[in-house]
Amino acid sequence: MPFNELNTVEHYIIQQLSGVNLNHANWAEEKGTYGLQWHYQPASELKRSVNEVLVESELRDALIGINPEIARQPERADEVIYKLRAILLMVNQVGLVKANEEFAKWLTGEKTMPFGPNNRHVPVYLIDFAEPDNNRFVLTNQYRTHHHETKIPDIVMLINGIPVVVGEAKTPIRPSVSWLDGAHEIHSIYENAVPQLFVPNILSFATEGKDLFYGSVRCPLEQWPPWRLETDEDSLIKALGLGKVGKELTDLLQPKRLLDILQNFSLYSTDKKKRRIKIICRYQQYEGANRIVERVREGRLKKGLIWHFQGSGKSLLMVFAAQKLRRLPELKSPTVIILVDRTDLDTQISGTFNAADVANVQPTENIKELHDLLAKDTRKIIISMIHKFRDAPPNMNTRDNIIVLVDEAHRTQEGDLARQMRAALPNAFLFGLTGTPVNKVDKNTFWAFGSEEDEKGYLSRYTFQDSIRDKATLPLHFEPRLVDVHVDKATIDKLFKELTDEAALSDEEADALSKKAAKMSAFLKSPERVELIVNDIAKHFKEKVLPHGFKAMIVTPDRYACVQYKEALDKHFVTEASRVVISTSANDDYEFKQKWALDKSQQEKVLDEFNDAASPLKFLIVTAKLLTGFDAPILQTMYLDKSLKDHTLLQAICRTNRLYPNKTFGCIVDYFGIFDDAAEALQFDEETVKKVVTNLQELRDKLPEAMRDCLQHFTGVDRTLRGFEGLEAAQEAIKTNEQKDAFALDFTYLVKLWESLSPDAVLNPYQTDYKWLSQVYESVKPAGDGIGKLLWYTLGAQTTKLIHENIHVGGIDDLAEFVLDADIIDDLSKNPNSQKVKQLEKELISRWNKDAGNPKYKELSDRLEDLRNKAERGLIASIDFVKELCKLAQETVQAERETEPVAIRKTGAAALTELFLEIKTDQTPAVVERIVTDIDQIVKVVRFPGWQTTVAGEREVQKSLRQSLLKYKLHKDQQLFDRAYGYIKEYY
């Protein structure tokens, strides 16, 4: 007998599922070797006509056997069947998905009829879920059906006379034929020609004996997933065509699993175009959700870590898990908390639950609402954010049937907020879900959620490679296109020195300014560089993205770079082709906010437009927004010009890996050089994690000693004392620099220990002391940024311009190394050289001699002489001598700039001196000169040209004035403040 699809794949499916081999002449005498299993029955033996979808005689028997109320009056079965026929007939009016949704309510026992006492409505069951053996599972083939046309599906599977699975088998011996041919026949031909057959459908499948794929009604073929085995015990069998498919078939279509999918793993949702769609689980969602459920059912272990790669459907996994947990009667109406750590994820998760019409979902708007829900013992699915557990009291709810599913279990899910959540819900189950591999970077996540009893620490694991293999996500292609940048450092050094000299900045201010200007973003935003990259983006997009109907995202260094890229892109495309999506803050300029701010509804409108293939919007330009929690399958290419690391990097680049028609890969065009980081982030170092986990006890053991070491710096200090008295007492205990340094060293070590252990409950007894030490440390540590905001406003633009003018861009080179030297500082103070020092001394003396009568120069000269004397006696280190000399030089430049004929204008200092002398009383501090000097110096630092006409400028100067007056206890005199501010506006 030659091989064909009937005697190979079709008969093989029947034999695998029922134990009957139709290739044997005596198949009718064979019996299945399984207990709860499918029973083969030829289509000719089923009591139905070609126009009937249901085998009504079997359905009637099932209704009577399962429902006592119908058993008492068997004619009631006909009333139910009449209702079901009506749903089958309405498919032409409402569409297949809506008819399928309505029929599913009957299949899952959600519908009622007035069959109870006094016509009370009671549930009607078509299937017995509690006792599956009470159902009749029939497998048949060549199931002839007529509606618009007559069609004959290869395989049909019926439960209690209801066809719930349709399968198509293709030949395994023709290379041009694949499972896709069978899936196409079901999806495009059968569902249209005989839609009534698919109204009760749970799922359909197709195979050519090599691969098995399945899908729900109206599911596009590119979204049909494969079914994999939960275990991988027999890799040889899996590699051998029919053996592999046979195992997958029996695994997917075993009766209990099919009932589980029907009851707990099927959803009806609304897509972006407001169309109703049916969603059934992929195997990794089924496995992950069921492992959560089984762990809760067992009740022994209270945690688990689920790693499913970005884009593989974690949101739906949580929906399926929550839905099944809520339905289990033995869990006694549990509370399921879905916990996220960012607003965008909150929006995504809430959207998924809402679109799927999941029952009893309760979002939380604020901290109080979450606390109230838990305190009132609410039994629902609660969606919240981790920060809403702030200040949650311990033991807020001690029930043991609270299950917390933590999305993106990184960052804040591991810190103090997580400990507060654990303390508030001490008996809750905690499951962490993550889309990025857990490695040495996030060791906390691994042990905070992972159980040592789980293989490799994971309750469920679905890797990058798994998701690509199963077509759950698309592969990622990287195009490194690095920009050749040349920095004229010598010119920048020279011009920067002149700029800071002219501004009379201190060493600290000059150093802070240079560091701020030399940040990577200053180089990345060089207009010449941005212009070159946007030209390349336009060319790449027009050639490789636009013709295929896809869209793109541009990721820039910061919010202002977004605007730069938008303006440059508008030269190549119409204005409507791109939108900037950024956050704005209260401190932003009014014009900036007016032009670029988007509220929530505006942003949603932009994203809907982006997802619409017909809209003119082709680019989203972002810097931080939309890099996580944003699904736009039409997004195929990301133009990346920003440093991203670890989880953020993986989450960002995986925005492009979602499935979309004709899309075969996601593309990352890398202008920054993150390729190596991305490759590293995709690696998983299990040995490192194992080592970290085993070392945790060692860290716990070190904690008490580290805490004692920190507290011993404050022996005798009353740590219960609050307010400034308590802080003053703590500061007095470490008043010398040596004492502060010693405390800082011990506290830094404690912080590292604390962060490594958090959210371990071992930290709880130390919480109060740790908080106290943190506050003391913050009060004594040096300021991290000595540069005022308005100093940057004053000189920042000039500094950035200086750098941009001396950055020259060659071209874009796939192999060029992108090297930036950001160390632009005055090396005189860092590398003292005796020859340069001598030259500087001579130059200063020469300048002072030109105006020997100037008292300021006399003072500077005296200070230099004093400095020399100290150096000769060894009272000052050489580096300190150079720094003091630099200060003298800067003060000299400032004095030269301020030396003008008094007739030209009155100085601000002189005007302020007159004011303070005028209002001086017995209560006024005698040091008028010092008050004026303080105000004069601080105002000169924070002012900038035209500051009087900006809200930010006036606010910063007023703040500086109040601080100066506060120092001399004059801050409450409003009249003095107003007059002093008037002088400053006039003279500065």
Image (tube, rainbow, N blue to C red):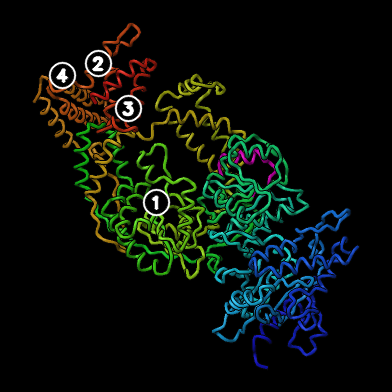
Left or right of 141? Residue 923 is left
Badge 3 element: helix
Comparing marks 3 and 4, which lies closer to the viewer?
Answer: 3
Could you say which disc has been placed on residue 913 in the image? Answer: 2
Q: Is residue 421 magenta?
A: yes
Residue stretch rendered in magenta on the structure? 414-430
- 605 or 720: which is nearer to us? 605
Label 2 environment density (alpha carbons within 10 Å; few <14, some 14–19, many ≥20): some
Which residue occupies 64% across, 52% down?
A: 304
Q: Earlier in the sequence, mark 4 or mark 1?
A: 1
Q: Quadrant of the C terminus?
A: top left
Q: Residue at x 11, y 28 (%)?
A: 847
- The reply to whether the C-beta atoms of the residues labelled 2 and 3 are less than 8 Å apart is no
User: Which is nearer the N-term, disc 2 or disc 1?
Assistant: 1
Dot 4 alpha-carbon crowd within 10 angstroms: few under 14, some 14 to 19, many 20 or more: few
Q: Earlier in the sequence, mark 4 or mark 2?
A: 4
Residue 293: x and y in percent read 70, 55
The residue sitting at 19% across, 42% down in the picture is 495
Mark seen at residue 957: 3
